[in-house]
Amino acid sequence: MSNTATRKIDRLIINSPYEAPKEHWERVQGTTSYFRRAPGRRSAGYIKAGDTRNPDDPGVFIPIELVNQIRMHVDKWREDGYPGVTGTTHHLLEHWYNNQERNHRFFYCQLEAMETII
């Protein structure tokens, strides 16, 4: 992982689709065209446009706090072994994560979505 800012993103996809994101591209604050790789998962949110007459205005990042809180709670629930689920649900979660029992692996985001629904 590099902290060096770059104008050209040479590799857009930097994480495996089968694992939790380990890093993400982050815009260098105050710029529109410089990026660096940052550790961890990107915070959920969106960019609200700034001054549309100024092409150098990167806008403002608005986090979606509810999504970020849900992600944190689901991560903890997973790490703790899914407390509070029935035996059947626990067996299903184990099956979804067991790549030896499945013909096609789920992407991490699919597994996380199923955990969130439960």
Image (cartoon, rainbow, N blue to C red):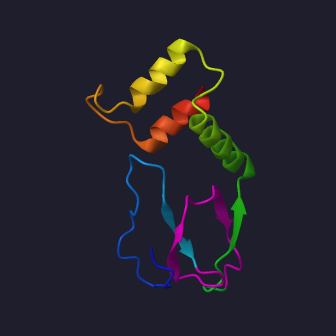
User: In the displayed structure, would residue 17 be above or below residue 101?
Assistant: below
Instruction: Name the residue located 41 percent from the left edge and 32 percent from the top edge.
Output: 97
Q: Position of residue 29 (x, y in %)?
A: 65, 81
Q: In the visual, does 98 lie left or right of 118?
A: left
Q: Residue furthest left?
A: 103
Q: Position of residue 20 (x, y in %)?
A: 48, 50
In magenta stretch: residue 103 = no
- Nearer the observer, 32 or 111: 111
Q: In the visual, does 101 lie left or right of 43?
A: left
Q: Quadrant of the N terminus?
A: bottom left
User: In the displayed structure, would residue 41 be above or below residue 48?
Assistant: above
Q: Quadrant of the C terminus?
A: top right
- Nearer the observer, 20 or 29: 20
Q: In the visual, does 21 lie left or right of 13?
A: right
What's the magenta region? 28-53
Q: Position of residue 57 (x, y in %)?
A: 66, 82
Q: Within the image, what quadrant is residue 117 found in?
A: top right
Magenta segment, prevailing SS (helix, strand or loop)? loop
Label total for image? 0
- Nearer the observer, 61 or 83: 83
In magenta stretch: residue 52 = yes
Instruction: Name the residue located 57 percent from the left edge and 76 percent from the top edge.
Output: 27
User: In the displayed structure, would residue 105 be above or below residue 52?
Assistant: above
Q: Within the image, what quadrant is residue 53 found in?
A: bottom right
Q: Position of residue 87 (x, y in %)?
A: 54, 13
Instruction: Name the residue located 54 percent from the left edge and 66 percent from the top edge.
Output: 39
Instruction: Name the residue located 46 percent from the left edge and 84 percent from the top edge.
Output: 6
User: In the displayed structure, would residue 23 be above or below residue 78?
Assistant: below
